[in-house]
Image (spheres, rainbow, N blue to C red):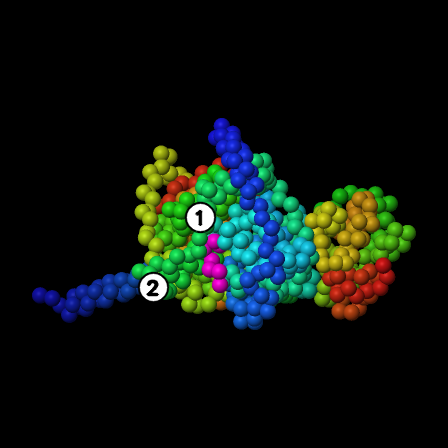
Amino acid sequence: MKRIAIVVIVVLLAAGGWWWFHNEAKAPVARSASEVNAAALKDPALIAKGEYLAIVGDCASCHTSQGGVRYAGGRVLPTPFGNIPSPNITPDRETGLGDWSFEDFWQALHAGKGRHGEFLYPVFSYTSFTKVSRDDALAMFAYLQSLAPVHAPALQPSLEFPYSVRSSLKAWRALYFHEGEFQRDASKSDEWNRGAYLVQGLGHCNECHAPRDSLGGQEGKASLAGGQIPAQNWYAPDLSTRANGGLAGWSEQDIVDLLKTGQSARGTAFGPMADVVTQSTQHLHEDDLRAIAVYLQSLPARPANAPENSPLDTRPIMAQGAKVYGERCADCHGKDGNGVAGVYPPLNGNSSVNEPTGINAMRVILLGGFAPVTHGNPRPYSMPPFAQQLSDADVAAVVTYIRRSWTNTASVVLERDVVKYRHTPID
Amino acid sequence: MTTHAAKWSQAGRVLGAWLVLVLMAQVGNARAQEAAHPVIPDTLQQRIAACTACHGTHGEGTPESGFFPRLAGKPAGYLARQLQDFQDGLRKYGPMEYTVRPLSPDYMREIAEYFAAQEVPYARSPVPTISAETRQRGETLVMHGDPSRQIPPCQACHGTQLTGVQPDIPGLVGLPYDYVSSQLGSWRTKTRATVAPDCMAEIANRLSESDITAVSAWLATRELPADMHAQPAGSVTPPLHCGVLGNKGDGV
């Protein structure tokens, strides 16, 4: 019923949007008519700055297919509304940005519109990128234009109706998109402002670390509050200093360490964040990492969830979990759940253990895997996958045990939750 | 009145109690350390628990089922290439793709060399009952190929003893029937591929389904040569151009 209502609303808004959109179609700005001349784009210092910023924005992660040429697009991004392939952003004239002017690029990044004024799907995170400064956008454009052109025709999105009607985005944008560059807060330090600019803008941390509603939109007030990543089914934790599920206990250095090396005294990056560290944050300058940490540490701690009083008698499941933990986990993570410094992450107080859903702990136990390979940690230790060895009941028990032991007070996880995530496609 | 003996006895008891306490404290400390700080060896073997959980500590695989392939003793270049192919999505298997995704080329090479250096006896695996005719067909394909269908013999690339060739060509003898037949099948269904030209994909597509059964069964029952090590590098001239061999080779 809810779904039907959503479809009706979207269709109505789409019809209205179509009418509006009709008046908004525009011709691209020709390169010859651009305010930026071609010679300016060839400046090596500008290109180098743009290359760094493209890494900060992790553009390659979406704009490169598995095993494909960097920035040539083709990675298919799953969303609850259908699959959307990323376009080629190398300067190929026919299939890439070869004919684009800086004005066209700015319009995409800042306003979320294509060259002809068409609305871009917000899987391209212009909800965050709108905060990027014009100078930084110019540097990234210069860098992308300096790449070797690759001929790679765009794949077509496979979206369900009514999402396949681009003009339906008019309504979505009215609800969720706030166009505008980052505004400095004069009462805060330069470092804090730099951190806020990177986190809210180019770093687009909110795209994963904030909850989405049924239309895939995000409310501003839930900024960095943590959220389940749609379709991928990982939980990106709260980045405030909230206890039990946030970054309580993390020092500035812990945040820098995680972003730089993939691991810290408080936890290790895995799943999508491991990719972010490998491809993006490990390459960031130390002062930018520190600025990000300063900003995150300044976020007011959201109140911790009240410890859940389960209506179930949790004693049997805790006993079963303790047994599994002793046999499979304690050798590395310790009986006290504190891990081994620099080797295995602590589970006690770990934000990914305590996140509201239990998804992260369930999936890490099933999948195992390596900590990200970085310059700071070139030969990481790894965790065995337990999908073959543990039943759904055992996984539920051990996840419940680690979520409710030591200082952890998160909710119980049930066998049916494990069933749900055991076969989540891995991408 | 207290005697000397009693004094000594009392002192002894105090000393004894003190010793017991010290010992208990030490045992307690050791326990606490054990609990708080598990001792983790700084070895590659410890680091790659994600690999050895399924493939075995020494890469022995699961010969009974053939589900997790043996890695031990396979040439390092071949193993490193497989990791790269999983990373690039040329080989399709979700858990492997997920596991190798964060690895660097250097680390993959080191892991490949670890398994390549493992010496593990070969175990025999179950093989379906096949007719003498099928068995003969298997032997013919392996040793002589089928020129009428442009199928080169396996031994032309995989070595005269079918134990592989350094550094990029794996051995075929000693592998389970289920493993070999499923790999040949996966080349046909495009869930296993490698850099072009992918000569094994071409060959697998020239084989019929009954050929795959025949070859896999013959290889799985072949008596193992005394020396299972791969032949030296450069000791074969591949009859096809193969991307994995640097596109060297003769013929079509």
A142 vs A304, left or right, is: right
Cα gap from disc 1 to disc 2, whole angstroms = 25 Å
Q: Name the residue under label 1.
A: A178
Q: Residue furthest right?
A: B148
Q: Which residue does the image show at 57% across and 60% down from the upper left?
A: A34
Element on which disc 1 rests: loop
Q: Give the mark nearest the N terminus, 1 or 2.
A: 1
Q: Which chain carries label 1?
A: A
Q: Position of residue A364 (x, y in %)?
A: 50, 50
Q: Is residue A132 magenta?
A: yes
Question: Image quadrant for the C terminus of chain B?
Answer: bottom right
User: Regarding mark 2 in the picture, which secondary structure is present there?
Assistant: loop
Residue reaching furthest to the top? A1
Q: What stretch is highlighted in magenta?
A: A129-135
* For residue A123, above or below residue A284: above
Question: In this rendering, does residue B37 appear at all?
Answer: no
Is residue A242 in view from this perspective?
yes
Q: Which residue lies furthest to the bottom in this view?
A: A44
Task: Name the residue at 45% across, 44% down.
Answer: A176
Residue type highlighted by circle 2: Ser
Would you name the residue on which mark 2 appears?
A189
- Counting from the top left corner in percent of width and height, residue A198 is at 44, 59
Instruction: Using residue B9 as the reference point, say whether residue A410 is left or right of it.
Output: right
Q: Which of B120 and A208 lies nearest the eye of the viewer?
A: A208
Callouts 1 and 2 close, C-beta under 8 Å: no
Specify the quadrant of the image occupied by residue B110. Answer: bottom right
Image location of residue A378, percent across then percent down? 53, 66
User: Picture coordinates of residue B109 (x, y %)?
Assistant: 62, 65
Identity, as a three-letter code, of the amino acid under mark 1: His
Given residues B128 and B12, the one toward you in this image is B128
